[in-house]
């Protein structure tokens, strides 16, 4: 292990001891905001320090075994201990490097999932509905909650556009690499001659802002329109101006919300989506500035980029960013996304580790 990494881990050990003392003291509960912040830091550091202690113990075991090599009766046992100890040190060193990688501050946030039909007309809208179902079923497995914020349905039951709010532990961390262009190759239900068509949808995954105040929104730069909601919902939802449309004039971002009977709740929901979209624009602008200095296969989230192809005739799904093809399309469309998600996260971590090694 490089000395700079070991030094950082030793400093974390000292910091953990300092936090342990502070949390056990009487002053810990004097300010609950400080208490929560220190507790969160303690929770983040503790597993890293525990890994480092395991690594140090494994190193010590190897040194003890090496001291036994001169004893003929113990030599065979010592060699075995050295081999297994070295393997354990190597594995723990890799885990420690991953634990020290820069953490995305948005990983623990809830998210807004936007799916829009692109090239392909009604077939693209049907595929948008398929993607929403796929993510919804994945969320069910993960015990996340999915709420539809707004939806524009197509004539055949698909979606021209649908926005959902996904809440749950680790939701953004698991789904943040889904942003981009999703392409489908299959025979549409409207095709009478059995020809395979190619259609596309765009997916955007945006972390939810803690509150609207986190994103600077000037009320003077908003145009807020109310109108009567359309679709199901009974007499009340269709006879009152409960639907809300908010336009952010500087960026041209438009958000509509009509799923609730209350205009007040629709406005609050629309403001949350607007804040997330503005934050998303700001993040992408920063990513564009950083693009010259870091090459990320999965971090750009460019919505025009084709990231994945779902080929129904061949039963395969291919993620083009990591050249991964799985012949389990049916399972994927039923929400079995872990293999894809884990591979994307592993690739991202590998890039981060490569960059870390280059900087050290």
Image: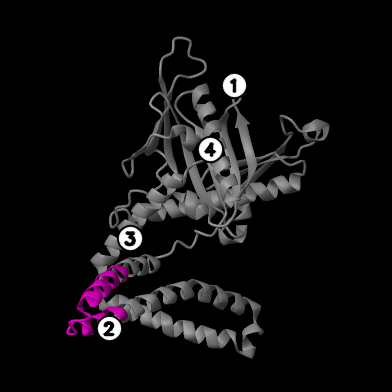
**Start-end of magenta stretch:** 61-88
> Could you tell me how far apart the alpha carbons at marks 1 and 2 are, in whole angstroms?
71 Å
Q: Viewer-nearest of labels 4 and 3?
A: 4
Q: Earlier in the sequence, mark 3 or mark 1?
A: 1
Query: Main SS type for the magenta part?
Result: helix
Labels 2 & 3 near each other (Cβ < 8 A)? no
Labels 1 & 2 near each other (Cβ < 8 A)? no
Which residue position holds label 2? 64
Labels 3 & 1 near each other (Cβ < 8 A)? no
Q: Earlier in the sequence, mark 2 or mark 3?
A: 2
Labels 4 & 1 near each other (Cβ < 8 A)? no
Locate residue 303, reporting x and y percent. Answer: 42, 41
Q: Earlier in the sequence, mark 1 or mark 2?
A: 2
Which residue position holds label 4? 134
Locate residue 290, reporting x and y percent. Answer: 33, 56
> Could you tell me how far apart the alpha carbons at marks 4 and 3 are, in whole angstroms?
29 Å
Q: Viewer-nearest of labels 2 and 3?
A: 2
Circle 3 — which element? helix
- Numbered disc total: 4
> Could you tell me how far apart the alpha carbons at marks 2 and 4 are, in whole angstroms?
53 Å
């Amino acid at each position: 292990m490089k000395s700079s990494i070991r030094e950082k881990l030793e400093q974390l050990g000292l910091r953990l001891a300092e936090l342990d003392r502070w949390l056990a003291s009487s002053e810990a509960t004097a300010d609950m905001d400080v208490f929560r912040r220190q507790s969160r830091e303690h929770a983040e550091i503790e597993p890293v320090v525990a890994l480092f202690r395991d690594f140090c113990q494994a190193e010590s075991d190897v040194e003890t075994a090496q001291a036994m090599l001169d004893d003929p009766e113990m030599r065979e046992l010592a060699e075995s201990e050295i081999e297994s100890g070295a393997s354990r040190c190597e594995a723990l060193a890799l885990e420690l490097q991953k634990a020290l990688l820069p953490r995305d501050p948005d990983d623990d946030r809830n998210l807004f999932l936007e799916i829009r039909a692109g090239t392909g007309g009604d077939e693209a809208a049907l595929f948008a509905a398929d993607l929403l179902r796929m993510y919804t079923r994945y969320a069910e497995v993960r015990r996340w909650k999915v709420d539809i914020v707004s939806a524009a349905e197509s004539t055949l039951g698909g979606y021209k556009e649908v926005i959902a709010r996904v809440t749950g532990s680790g939701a953004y961390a698991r789904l943040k690499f889904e942003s981009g262009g999703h392409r489908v190759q299959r025979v549409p239900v409207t095709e009478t001659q059995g020809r395979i068509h190619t259609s596309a949808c765009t997916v955007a995954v945006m972390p939810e802002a803690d509150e609207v105040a986190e994103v600077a929104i000037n009320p003077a730069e908003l145009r807020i329109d109310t109108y009567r909601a359309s679709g199901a919902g009974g007499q009340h939802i269709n006879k009152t101006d409960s639907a809300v449309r908010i336009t952010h004039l500087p960026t041209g971002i438009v958000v509509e919300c009509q799923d609730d009977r209350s205009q007040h709740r629709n406005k609050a929901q629309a403001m949350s989506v607007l804040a997330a979209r503005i934050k998303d624009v700001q993040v992408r602008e920063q990513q564009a500035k950083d693009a010259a200095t870091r090459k990320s296969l999965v971090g750009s989230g460019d919505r025009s980029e084709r990231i994945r192809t779902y080929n129904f005739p061949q039963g395969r799904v291919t993620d083009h960013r990591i050249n991964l093809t799985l012949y389990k399309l049916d399972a994927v469309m039923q929400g079995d996304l872990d293999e894809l998600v884990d591979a994307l996260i592993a690739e991202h971590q590998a890039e981060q580790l490569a960059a870390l090694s280059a900087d050290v």
